[in-house]
Amino acid sequence: MDSELTTAEGHEDGERPIAAFFDLDKTLLLVNSGQLWFRRERAEGRLPLHHAIEAGVWLQLYKLGLMNGRTALSRAVQSLKGELEQDLRDRTQRFFDDEIASEFAPGTETALMAHRQAGHQLVLLTSASLYLSQLVQERLNLDDILCMEFEVEAGRLTGAIQQLCFGDAKVGVAEQWASTRSIDLKDCFFYSDSITDLPMLDRVGRPVAVHPDARLAKLARQRSWPILDWSQPVRAPAATLGREATVRA
């Protein structure tokens, strides 16, 4: 895995609109924001220990294919039921300032700059909440965000999920977004660290593994997908990153 990239042959990006989709945790960020959030909620007394354990079990069952994503995540967010949406926004802002703002991968900005220069739309595609995703969008100047959205009634969270954006559900969310913009996902990039994002990595034409987990790293090598390390500043000229990229061995 390297941070140096070189350009591969491909069609000219200017022929039609292209999007570069980015996962958040362990991709644009060096950390898992969800784990940090649950740890903070637990430390500040808002998340009972048994709720934290249950949420972890449900998400693990999803990863093992024993529970669908909507059920797992719906159960995991039940602790938010009845909370004022504005309170959650305010708490997320403090969380971002304290624990997230300093954790963007050093190579992120170079990659984003390259896609901007190529005229690509920059889209965050993440299971993180709308409230955190909006702060990331503002910090990185992204064109759009596709993320987890909670159902809200009369200013309070109901404990239900309005938009699921996790695992294979990311594909449907991205397809709907792209269809309204005349974008073909086969022309697009998707950067992710996790094997749980395999459906979306398979759906786009330009999948890229960034800081991949063991299963994704193995698959990426088998399929000759780029494997990138943004934990250090990317040394390649920004212009070379806006097209299909391969890792320099």
Image (cartoon, rainbow, N blue to C red):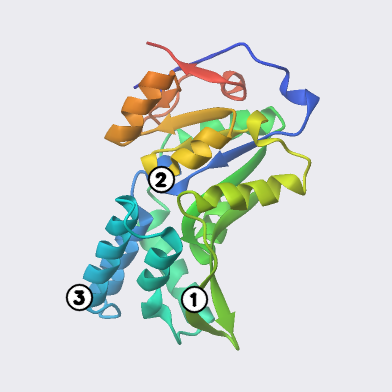
In this figure, which residue is indicated by the disc labeled 3? 49
| Outermost residue, front side | 66
In this figure, which residue is indicated by the disc labeled 2? 29
Given this view, does label 1 or label 3 mark the residue nearer the observer?
Answer: 1
Based on the displayed image, in which of its 4 quarters is residue 162 positioned?
Answer: bottom right
Distance from label 2 to label 1 (Cα)? 27 Å
Based on the displayed image, in which of its 4 quarters is residue 123 positioned?
Answer: top right
Q: Are marks 2 and 1 in contact (CB under 8 Å)?
A: no
Determine whether, in the image, residue 114 is placed left or right of residue 67: right
Percent from the top left, x then y, of residue 86? 53, 80
Q: At label 3, which amino acid type do we have?
A: Leu
Given this view, does label 3 or label 2 mark the residue nearer the observer?
Answer: 3
Q: At label 2, which amino acid type do we have?
A: Leu
Assess disc 2: are there few (<14), some (14-19) or many (≥20) residues with their C-alpha within 10 Å of its C-alpha. many
In this figure, which residue is indicated by the disc labeled 1? 160
> First in sequence: mark 1 or mark 3?
3
